[in-house]
Amino acid sequence: MSKKHVSETPATQLLRRQGVAFGEHVYDYVDHGGTAESSRQLGVPEHEVVKTLVMQDERAQPLIVLMHGDCQVSLKELARQIPCKKVEPCKPEVAQRHSGYMVGGTSPFGTRKTMPVFVERSILALPRILINGGRRGYLLSLDPACLEGLLQARAVDCALREV
């Protein structure tokens, strides 16, 4: 855990208000480095680093998908399970408008707009996860149970392992 001071974000404010315990982890953000870069710098398995992905359905209604850092989302399987006709990633500027966060710093906590949250089921079985704290280069470690409790995240099975 870094001793570097990090100012509050909407995500950390929400977690503190709700009494959720979390650790703060600062790393040097690298454009297009993704979870591979953050896991390398922080010395944690990429499988425990959770990506926050802002997507939309066929009616352009936004939703959040939480996925293991070392996996991709099967859009077809996600659409089948939630259910809707089609799911696709939002363009970065649209994702930012919905979440209030810059892409690369998106947290599922404290978003500008309330959106349904879907979490890959196996994430909930991990003892702890690292997830974006609302700023590039800033992850929070916490118990994944708060995803269901605080975000009413619905478990789905739509992970594709990266090769």
Image (spheres, grey):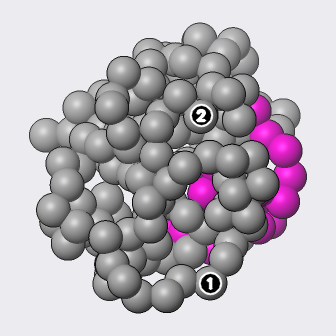
Q: Which mark is residue 147?
A: 2
Relative image position of residue 67 (x, y in whole percent):
43, 38
In the picture, the quarter occupied by the N terminus is bottom left
Nearest to the observer: residue 11 or residue 19 = 19
Question: Going from the N terminus, do you reach mark 2 or mark 1 first?
Answer: 1
Q: Is residue 113 left or right of residue 3?
A: right
- Element under disc 1: loop
Please name the residue that numbered disc 1 is placed on.
Answer: 7
The magenta segment: 96-116
Q: Residues within 10 Å of mark 1 (few under 14, many from 20)?
A: few
Magenta span includes 9: no
Residue in front for this viewpoint, 122 or 4: 4
Give the spatial CA distance, label 2 vs label 1. Answer: 23 Å
* Point 33% across, 78% down: residue: 2
- Is residue 110 shown to the viewer in this render? yes
Question: Would you say 81 lies left or right of 57 here?
Answer: left
Whether residue 25 sits left or right of residue 39 in the image: it is right
Q: Secondary structure at mark 2?
A: helix
Q: Main secondary structure of the magenta part?
A: loop
Name the residue rendered at 54%, 83% in the picture.
Answer: 6
- Report crowding for label 2: few under 14, some 14 to 19, many 20 or more residues within 10 A (C-alpha): many
Residue flagged by tag 1: what amino acid is it? Ser
In this view of the protein, which residue sits in the foreground, 9 or 156?
9
Q: Residue at x 20, y 72 (%)?
A: 41
Residue 10 location, quadrant = bottom right
Q: What amino acid type should be assigned to the residue bearing mark 2?
A: Leu
